[in-house]
Image (spheres, rainbow, N blue to C red):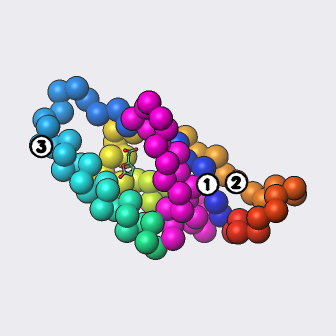
Amino acid sequence: MLYHVQMTVRLPADLPTEVAADLKAREKALAQQLQREGVWRHLWRIAGQYANVSIFDVPDHATLHDTLMRLPLFPYMDITVLPLCRHPSSLHDDER
Ligand SMILES: O=C(O)CC1=CCC(=O)O1
């Protein structure tokens, strides 16, 4: 199943710089691993915001939940999820 996921990062202002840098580095490593595995299909920055729009390809809601909870920045993100299904007018058949 495909999911549209919006993540807005809200790091506390008093979070030590080195802690924030470690979280971001680990987030990047896992995000790139999940992209290589075909799970994190798209990752786009929302211009002007510390936020992204992503497309995840996972078997079900529970797997998406578990995947999002693995993200190092999970405790510091507001996340909204929209489950997607094929639009009858779409020319693209890569929705799984
Ligand atoms: O910067 C973000 O939008 C949060 C994030 C998701 C994957 C990543 O590397 O950073």
Residue at the spot 76% in from the left edge and 64% down from the top edge: 92
What residue span does the magenta drawing correspond to? 38-62
Residue 31 pos. (x, y %): 38, 59
Query: Considering depth in this image, is 36 or 58 the residue closer to the camera?
Result: 36
Q: Amino acid at mark 2?
A: Leu
- Seen in the picture, residue 1 relative to 9 is either above or below; the reply is below
Mark number, residue 36? none
Which circle's residue, 2 or 1, is located before the other in the chain? 1
Name the image quarter holding the C terminus: bottom right
Outermost top residue: 13
Name the image quarter holding the N terminus: bottom right
Residue 12 pos. (x, y %): 25, 29
Q: Quadrant location of residue 36?
A: bottom left
What residue did someone put label 1 on? Answer: 3
What residue did someone put label 2 on? Answer: 84
Q: Amino acid at mark 1?
A: Tyr
Which circle's residue, 3 or 1, is located before the other in the chain? 1
Task: Answer few, some or many: residues within 10 Å of disc 3's Cα (few below 14, many 20 plus, some between 14 and 19).
Answer: few
Q: Amino acid at mark 3?
A: Glu
Which circle's residue, 3 or 2, is located before the other in the chain? 3
Query: Horizontal placement of 2 versus 31: left or right?
Result: right
Question: In the rendered image, is residue 14 in sight?
Answer: yes
